[in-house]
Amino acid sequence: MSRIIFFVILIGGAYFLYRRFVSDAEKLQAKSKAAEKERQTGAMGTLVKDEVTGEYRVKREEE
């Protein structure tokens, strides 16, 4: 019985790490694509509209 619990925990941990790796890779790929697009167009940054004030600002790293 303890072996079964051990393997379930092991498989669950491996799955969790795999999903985290995939999500990090997707974020990195999206960031890389955005940087490449900015490089191709010669842009200095990406503007986003603030919904509250209606003003445009440069997109932050964490967005």
Image: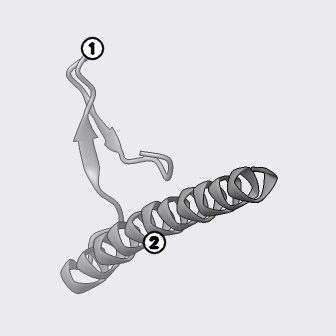
Write down the residue under mark 1.
Answer: 52
Mark 1 is on which residue type? Val
Q: Residue at x 33, y 39 (%)?
A: 57
- Of all residues, the one furthest to the bottom in this rendering is 40
Q: Position of residue 49 (x, y in %)?
A: 22, 34
Q: Who comes first in sequence, dot 2 or dot 1?
A: 2
Above or below, 37 against 40 in this view is above
- Residue 28's place in the image compared with 9, above or below, is below
Determine crowd level at label 2: few under 14, some 14-19, many 20+ residues with C-alpha closer than 10 A.
Answer: few
Q: Secondary structure at mark 2?
A: helix
Q: Position of residue 62 (x, y in %)?
A: 50, 47
Residue occupying image coordinates x 68% and y 61%: 7
Q: Nearer the viewer, residue 4 or 14?
A: 4
In the rendering, which numbered label is found on residue 16? none
Element type at mark 1: loop
Image position of 1 with respect to 27: above or below: above
Q: Where in the figure is residue 41, as x and y percent of width and height? A: 19, 79
The residue nearer to you, when weighing 44 against 11, is 11
User: Residue 3, located in which quarter of the rendered image?
Assistant: bottom right
Residue depicted at 30% across the width and 82% down the height:
36
In-image side of 23 versus 16 (left or right): left
In three-dimensional space, the C-alpha distance between marks 2 and 1, rounded to whole angstroms, equals 32 Å
Q: Which residue matches tag 2?
A: 25
Q: Amino acid at mark 2?
A: Ala
Q: How is the image coloured?
A: one colour
Q: Position of residue 42 (x, y in %)?
A: 26, 79
Q: Which quadrant of the structure image shows residue 45?
A: bottom left
